Amino acid sequence: MRKPNSKEFHKKQLRKLRSKEFRKKQIDEINLLNSWIQSQKPESGSNPMSVPPLPNNSPVGRLADGTFSRYAGVARFEQLPISKNIKKALIRSKFVSMTDIQRASLPHALCGRDVLGASKTGSGKTLAFIIPVSVVLISVFGLGA
Ligand SMILES: Nc1ncnc2c1ncn2[C@@H]1O[C@H](COP(=O)(O)OP(=O)(O)OP(=O)(O)O)[C@@H](O)[C@H]1O
């Protein structure tokens, strides 16, 4: 019988372990985001634009007392309950502040509601649609996006 190549074997084991760790981290993040989304869900039909934005230096996500920050009405992408990787991608593309249609629609779309929105051309509707779609794809299919 051929002796297993121990270097190859260890590399394979390491890859397996890393992908398990990666998936576990991903599941933990998805669970945290879901708790955040559910606990701070805006009322159905409410207008997030009528809520004042959070200050820029306000803590975001799970707070020291175990509650979560509000995401309805926020003005910056980093204040939304979306994965770190999506936030990184937005920053890389220099998207920091949301446009009005994004502020108005994303809090409802992220908690799974159907949204019918209209705004003028070039106002950011595509991103308002793509972000919630990406969030669902990641949480359902576990893509590394
Ligand atoms: N929050 C944002 N900050 C900066 N730029 C943005 C933001 N959101 C979208 N953009 C940019 O604004 C431009 C227009 O956005 P987009 O194409 O999404 O508008 P739209 O409302 O979908 O337009 P249309 O009605 O023509 O489809 C794009 O170049 C996009 O990258």
Image (cartoon, helix red, strand yellow):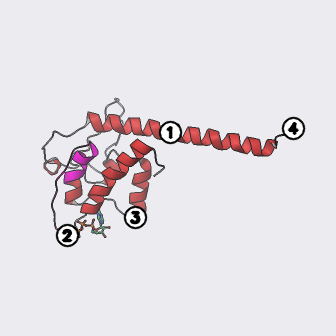
Q: Residues within 10 Å of mark 3 (few under 14, many from 20)?
A: few
Q: Which residue is drawn at 37% across and 52% down?
A: 134
Label 4–label 3 contact, CB within 8 A: no
The quarter of the image that holds ligand 1 is bottom left
Say whether mark 2 is within 8 Å of ligand 1.
yes
N-terminal of the pair, mark 4 or mark 1, is: 4
Marking on residue 93:
3
Coordinates of residue 77 in the picture (x, y in percent):
32, 53
Q: How far apart are marks 4 and 3 (CA)?
A: 54 Å
Q: Callout 1: 10 Å neighbours few (<14), some, many (20+)? A: few
Give residue 53's position: percent from left, percent from top. 22, 50
On the image, numbered disc 2 is attached to which residue?
Answer: 121
Q: Is 81 within the magenta?
A: no
Residue 1: assigned label: 4
Quarter of the rendering occupied by the N terminus: top right
The answer to whether marks 4 and 2 mark residues whose Cβ atoms lie closer than 8 Å is no
Q: Closer to us: mark 4 or mark 1?
A: 4
Label 4 to label 2: alpha-carbon separation: 68 Å
- Mark 2 or mark 4, which is nearer the start of the sequence? 4
Label 2: few (<14), some (14–19) or many (≥20) C-alpha neighbours in 10 Å: few
**Residue 92 in sight:** yes
Span highlighted in magenta in the image: 104-122
Q: What residue type is labelled 3?
A: Ser
Disc 4 residue type (three-letter): Met
Vertical relation: 35 (above or below) 127: above
Secondary structure beneath dot 3 equals loop
